[in-house]
Image (tube, rainbow, N blue to C red):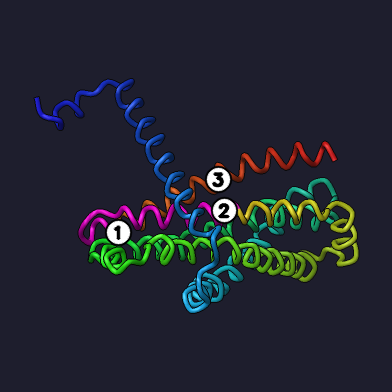
Amino acid sequence: MNSRTTTSHESPIHSLGRIVVDFVSLAGDITLFGVRMLTWILPGWPRGNVLWPVMYQIGVLSLPVIMITGGFIGMVLAVQAYEQFALMHMESQLGTVVNVTLLKELGPVLAAVMLAGRVGSSMAAQLGTMRVTEQIDALTALGANPIAYLVVPRFLACVLLIPMLTLCADGIGVLSGWWFSTQVLDVESFFYWHHSRRFVTNFDLFSGILKSVFFGASISLIACHRGFHSSAGAEGVGQAATEAFVYSFVAILAMDFLLGYLMMNIYHMI
């Protein structure tokens, strides 16, 4: 019996077991890939002519989509929350829910998702193309380590710049939510900011920025791993780009839950 026939007649337990084994194998492979990358970060940073173009590609060129996303999210939160608050005659506290939600959750998560869609897929496609066209093998033959030359700059750029992109998304979202609430929904500006200052804390901002650092690290690591392990052909490169975004999105949601739960416990302990 061939393997295709065997797979088609797998029991649900066998299918579940195969999925679990594949997941554990992938997670272990990405972890080992990250350890190899860290061994090249600790001795020293990459040269400026290698790092700066990557930072420009990841940070500066991502600003427009980050700012547009943050602006609309602030207004969407104001619209959705206003209906519920109006039922309880608490429109003056609209700024609290808009700003807390932006700083703690939606700002970091949506900035990371946009970065995964724009930068993660691009990195996976670039490295996948280099793998298919044997450029990575050529770097090895020339005596350069491909992880140090290709992965480390992208990892550092994501980790260092995504907190700044998150702050931009937070700032634009807060301002757009305030503008829409006061100019369209007729909420008093004084009470909007008064209640925001009462309930929005520095810990909320810190937790969002800390989450973004982990999000950026996971995006760059997963995208580079998928690119390095791309299969041959245009289909393989496209699949690597798709997997980079999907795996990054799942990792962002999982880490958001775990870090959010951890931050909640730390906040109650302080």
> Three-letter amino acid code at disc 2?
Phe
- Tag 3, which secondary structure? helix
Of the image marks 3 and 2, the number of the one nearer the N terminus: 2
Of the image marks 2 and 1, the number of the one nearer the N terminus: 2
Pointer 1 residue:
238
Instruction: Magenta stretch: give its range.
Output: 214-238
* Quadrant assignment, res 236: bottom left
Mark 3 and 1 residues: CB-CB less than 8 Å, in contact? no
Q: Nearer the viewer, residue 79 or 34?
A: 34
Pointer 2 residue:
215
Tell me residue 154's x, y (percent). 48, 64
Q: Which mark is residue 253?
A: 3
Is label 2 or label 1 in front? 2
Q: Quadrant of the N terminus?
A: top left
- Tag 1, which secondary structure? helix
Q: Quadrant of the C terminus?
A: top right
Residue 152 is a magenta residue: no
Between the residue at mark 2 and the residue at mark 1, the CA separation in whole angstroms equals 23 Å
The residue carrying pointer 1 sits among few (fewer than 14), some (14 to 19) or many (20 or more) residues within 10 Å by Cα, namely: some
Residue for point 54% across, 67% down: 45
Where is 141 relative to 4, above or below?
below
Residue for point 63% across, 56% down: 108
Between the residue at mark 3 and the residue at mark 1, the CA separation in whole angstroms equals 23 Å
Tell me residue 216's x, y (percent). 55, 57
Tell whether 126 sits left or right of 70.
left
Secondary structure of the magenta portion, mostly?
Answer: helix
